[in-house]
Image (tube, helix red, strand yellow):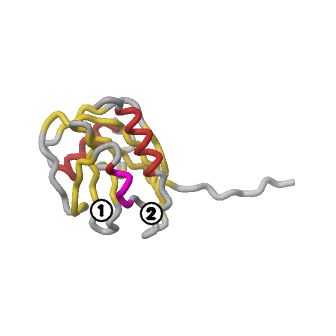
Amino acid sequence: MAAMARDIQRFEVSLKAFIVRDGRVLLLRESDTGWWELPGGRIDVGEEWQPHADILAREIAEELGADVRLDVSPQAVTWVRYRAMDGMHLLIIARPASLIAGEPRLSDEHDDLLWIDRDGWQQLEFPPQSGYREALSRLWALAGGQ
């Protein structure tokens, strides 16, 4: 009996930073959807072999400004987000980080930013069909007493 062919899910990979300062995490609101998210973004074509830290630094510079510098933890939390606008699934890898230089400012990709405490983020709207809420809880646990 021949093996049945199966569909293989395709993903884009996104690297995010869970940036904590003074007991608050930085969240951004997407301009096009109104959903809240962590700063960071997708691995671009040609970056497949670059260190993740370099890709995340590029994304942070694009979204928050070139003067923003982070101390990024090697620990990570992963989850999946379904993006309805194009039917794509994003595999998201997020790492706890501390802001060590610069003051984040908005790019055109986002229309608002918040520094929010451990309880405040739960009132915000995150992308549906995503693991954002559970992931943020796990990231808070990793960030510990920051």
- Taking the spot 50% from the left edge, 60% from the top edge, the residue there is 129
Q: Is residue 28 magenta?
A: no
Distance from disc 2 to disc 1, alpha carbons, whole Å, reads: 12 Å
* Total count of labels: 2
Q: Which residues are magenta?
A: 121-125
Q: Which residue is mark 1?
A: 30
Residue 102 image offset from top left, x and y in percent: 12, 41
Reading the chain from its start, which is encountered first: label 2 or label 1?
1
Q: Which residue is mark 2?
A: 83
The rendered magenta stretch, by its main secondary structure, is classed as helix
- Compared with 57, 37 (above or below) is below
* Quadrant of the frame with the N terminus: bottom right
- Taking the spot 40% from the left edge, 31% from the top edge, the residue there is 75
Drawn side of residue 11 relative to residue 65, left or right: right
Residue 133 image offset from top left, x and y in percent: 44, 50
Residue 10 visible to an observer of this rendering: yes
